[in-house]
Amino acid sequence: MRPQNDTLLRALLREPTEYTPIWLMRQAGRYMPEYNATRKRAGSFLGLAKSPAYATEVTLQPVDRFKLDAAILFSDILTVPDAMGLGLYFVDGEGPKFERPVRTEADVARLACPDPNVELKYVTDTVRQVRTALANRIPLIGFSGSPFTLACYMIEGGGSSDFRLIKTMLYSRPDLLHRLLDVNARAVAAYLNAQIEAGAQAVMVFDTWGGILADGAYQEFSLAYMRKVIAQMKREHDGDRIPSIVFTKGGGLWLEEIADLGCDGVGLDWTVNLTRARARIGDRCSLQGNLDPMVLFAGANEIEAAATRVLNAFGPLHDQHGKVGGHVFNLGHGISQFTPPESVQTLVEVVHSQSRMQRV
Amino acid sequence: MRPQNDTLLRALLREPTEYTPIWLMRQAGRYMPEYNATRKRAGSFLGLAKSPAYATEVTLQPVDRFKLDAAILFSDILTVPDAMGLGLYFVDGEGPKFERPVRTEADVARLACPDPNVELKYVTDTVRQVRTALANRIPLIGFSGSPFTLACYMIEGGGSSDFRLIKTMLYSRPDLLHRLLDVNARAVAAYLNAQIEAGAQAVMVFDTWGGILADGAYQEFSLAYMRKVIAQMKREHDGDRIPSIVFTKGGGLWLEEIADLGCDGVGLDWTVNLTRARARIGDRCSLQGNLDPMVLFAGANEIEAAATRVLNAFGPLHDQHGKVGGHVFNLGHGISQFTPPESVQTLVEVVHSQSRMQRV
């Protein structure tokens, strides 16, 4: 059953909407004092992410505070490789790390697809608890990292500035990387399907690092495995269509190929011209994005002007052929931890009011 | 007078060449043992960069070791803001920093264009010494950071992962950033002209950080100021045409606009499809790039295959209309400090031999 406010789902499926729906990548996070309070009680980031009670609490915080049109599951992007036994841990100020990174042929051979209802039960439990708490007011988005993005962390053992280890494997042992990505694609598809079965009403694949790949390598090592994920994914649950969104940060040159994956929505970062993106792929997919998160450090007038420019760049609901276009307002990347919460308030109000006026 | 080997200049000016010329961004650097030896003698990176004798020595090292088709001036990208009095310094493992970053209206008001023949005399001296040492065997490329890229460091005070300070100024005080960029554009043009007068036979503008800007902001805050630089630049010296190259890393979506700057060559990172780039702008500019530097961590066979793919992606010297295309082989970004020097040897040989075969 569709939620009371199903504007997000309608926009993703390119059905008419009364206004442009908005949610923000990383909307539950450190810029919110209430998040920091919960995080303190949880003791650690992983303690927070792995506890369905705490994760539910922080998932709801931004949708309680702002009139957002969707909740997104609070979780870490690396739950899947953690469930594969790589030993996820966090060092303050350094981002995620793995105790047992994947470096050798034997490491790759050992990898197996986790059972999301066993090793990742804390995630599906969170999905169920969030759905109960939301009482179907707005939809809940589930998510996963893309097979390639997970592989980056699995091989590098953490973040990287040059991705030297994964690219060395890519260029010297492509067979090995393909084997790893094949496990990842199956694991990601199973993970997203488990989230859908637990109640996620839309899903998003975050290809955070696909944009570091060379043209050619992107298609072979990231896009192909997202295609496998989309192909294995449930498209319906309990009679409802489950829209999917694919976002490759830095993937603006490859939008046509992403739109051909079979996903419903394509995420865009702020380097992409939204008018041109709609002309390129707007007949096949809805578009999500693409305000520079740093706009939220300016004053209310500047936020209003910049958000209006994004809405105008997408243009009217109907294109020149009378076809409905789908636009989900979002940032072009996750919100900064230093963002003043009042800026988010301003943004949500502006997007709603300006886009309603556009429909008149 | 053109150098004995003027293949690079001819490729940049889209004149016929017998083979595809190659040089590598950051070709004089830490992957070479002889560079590290000189650096040790110089005592520090700035000691090396600011000494014409040492800088000349390291500029020549890669062209002595490999059959490269150009030398590029060894210098730091931040010499211009250093000459403005910001106090450049280096902390080991942390990259460049400024003692006096530009943060306030008063800071911007204080900025003045340095005289390159006074405050940057160590650079023009290096250019002259390199030219003497090269004895016109191959051309010498001069360079500068772009006005926007310099502004990033000047405002952030060093490297940044989110460019929050410069983007906050951009979105809340665009007038201030424009004033700063105007000074930078004049300073960069004067700096490049001084290098040309001292003997640089081609020049390149490195817009390393233009790609972090939103569409719209890129045009207003980076592209517009590179246009000013190109407009103020000497196009000829001593009867020779001085070709210019503009490279915005992550600028693949804006190639048409870059090609319209009036530069001769456009640098491409590895995310760009070279065939499509040639179709988009190859009738107006030569193209430089675009091998992923990480290919150099694979074996000789893989390097050969990847380099051949780049050459084939550019395609034959003459396009389908019989017009000569210009391709300068390069990496899509600076060479990694961990690169095995033998890989560079392999790459240079492959590019030369394969492209000669393409011409037959």
Image (spheres, coloured by chain):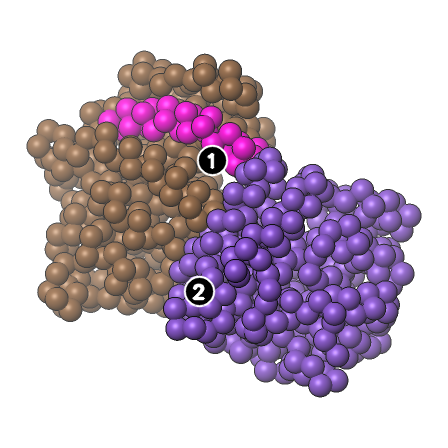
Chain colours: A purple, B brown
Q: Position of residue A297 (x, y in %)?
A: 61, 37
Residue A174 visible in the picture: no
Residue B38 image point, x, y percent = 43, 30
State the mark number for residue A278. Answer: 2
Residue B130 spot, x, y in % from top left = 26, 29
Q: Amino acid at mark 1?
A: Asn
Q: Disc 2 marks which amino acid?
A: Arg
Q: Residue at coordinates 75% horizontally, 79% vertically from top-left?
A: A1
Badges 1 and 2, same chain: no
Residue at (22, 51) in percent of width and height:
B285
Which residue occupies 84% across, 76% down? Answer: A118
Residue B283 visible in this rendered orientation of the protein? yes
Relative to A343, B146 lies left or right: left
Q: Residue at x 38, y 43 (%)?
A: B219
Q: CA distance from mark 1 to mark 2?
A: 50 Å
- Residue B178: percent from the left, percent from the top? 41, 29
Give the farthest residue toward the front. A360
Q: Is residue B166 magenta?
A: yes
Magenta extent: B165-193
Mark 1: give few (<14), some (14-19) or many (20+) Cα within 10 Å.
Answer: some
Q: Chain of mark 2?
A: A
Which type of secondary structure does the marked residue at label 1 adopt?
A: helix
Please say if B163 is above or below A202: above
Overall secondary structure of the magenta section = helix
Query: In this image, A241 relative to A138: left or right?
Result: left
Outermost residue, bottom side: A239
Callout count: 2
Foreground residue, B290 or A264?
A264
For label 1, the residue is B36
Which chain hosts label 1?
B
User: Residue B35: which quarter of the image?
Assistant: top left
